[in-house]
């Protein structure tokens, strides 16, 4: 049984999908906590409605970065969290959390990293850049988080085509649907011990047909 914490700042569609998935797999996983920096975002509203514990950590509530880190660390401990899933979290994860949860933090990025990753590449910026660069394909990347933004070990990538009549808006919707599908798939691998390490590289153990 694994206890999960989700970090989210936005609409929370990935959070909601993962939460529903956790309910169907309640013998293997539970979402014990949501961490957000936005008091009123979709993710927090959903947590309130569904009685999921959440904490808000931002500069208004905790002007000192160290206090933000402490608040998060203490909550993770209190809820006995095993894995953290970043789902549209726009703040940096405090370094102590990254160190304490080495290879236990997942992130999803809406492009085929290393393309369109790193500083400034979040939200619609990513899809705008893909369109402007006339890429023929884009997709999602799911990776473990380390201290280098968008550069942690990649677990899984999946491509979709960029069509001639695509714009960033249309593309973002298709990529988001792909995010929902692939994030659940990888979390399912995680809770079923199908992600193994080959040196520094995570690999998906293919023993079952799925
Ligand atoms: C997703 O595209 C995610 O990859 C990105 O932010 C978006 C979050 O969407 N980092 P939601 O809040 O899960 O609906």
Image (cartoon, helix red, strand yellow):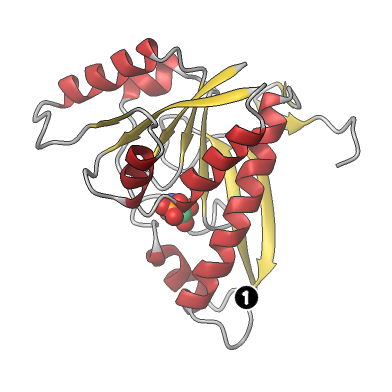
Q: Is residue 174 above or below residue 197?
A: below
Q: Which quarter of the rendering shows the C terminus?
A: top right
The residue that mark 1 highlights is: 162
Q: Position of residue 134 (x, y in %)?
A: 55, 79
The quarter of the displayed image where residue 112 is located: bottom right
Q: Quadrant of residue 184?
A: top right
Q: Residue at the location (81% across, 29% down)?
A: 205
All told, the count of numbered labels is: 1
Q: Nearer the viewer, residue 191 or 50?
A: 50
x and y percentages locating residue 138 in the rendered image: 61, 65
Q: Is mark 1 within 8 Å of ligand 1?
A: no
Q: Please give the name of the residue rendered at 63% of the width and 26% of the height, measured from the top-left corner.
A: 26
Q: Quadrant of the N terminus?
A: top right
In this view, 115 is above or below 129: above
Q: Residue 51: image x %, image y %? A: 38, 32
| Above or below: residue 210 compared with residue 171 | above
The secondary element bearing badge 1 is classed as loop
* Image-based side of 178 in relation to 15, left or right: right
Q: Position of residue 139 (x, y in %)?
A: 61, 60
**Vertical relation: 110 (above or below) 57:** below
Residue 209: tell me if it is visible. Answer: yes
Q: Residue at x 46, y 75 (%)?
A: 169
Image position of 201 (left or right of 73): right
Q: Is residue 117 visible?
A: no
Crowdedness near tag 1: few (<14), some (14–19) or many (≥20) residues, C-alpha within 10 Å? many
Q: Residue at x 58, y 53 (%)?
A: 179
């Amino acid at each position: 049984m694994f206890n999960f914490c989700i970090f989210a700042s936005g609409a929370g569609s990935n959070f909601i999908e993962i939460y529903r998935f956790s309910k169907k797999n309640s013998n293997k996983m539970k979402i014990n906590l949501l961490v957000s920096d936005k008091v009123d975002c979709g993710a927090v509203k959903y947590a309130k409605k569904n009685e999921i514990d959440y904490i808000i950590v931002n500069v208004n509530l905790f002007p000192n970065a160290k206090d933000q880190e402490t608040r998060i660390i203490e909550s993770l401990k209190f809820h006995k969290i095993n894995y953290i899933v970043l789902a549209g979290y726009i703040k940096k994860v405090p370094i102590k959390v990254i160190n304490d949860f080495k290879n236990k933090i997942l992130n999803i990025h809406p492009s085929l990293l290393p393309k369109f990753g790193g500083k400034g590449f979040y939200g619609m910026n990513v899809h705008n850049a893909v369109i402007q660069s006339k890429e023929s394909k884009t997709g999602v990347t799911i990776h473990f988080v380390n201290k280098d933004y968008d550069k942690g070990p990649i677990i899984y990538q999946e491509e979709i085509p960029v069509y001639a009549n695509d714009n960033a808006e249309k593309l973002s919707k298709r990529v988001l649907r792909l995010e929902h599908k692939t994030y659940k798939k990888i979390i399912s691998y995680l809770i079923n011990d199908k992600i193994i390490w080959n040196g520094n590289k995570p690999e998906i153990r293919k023993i079952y047909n799925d």
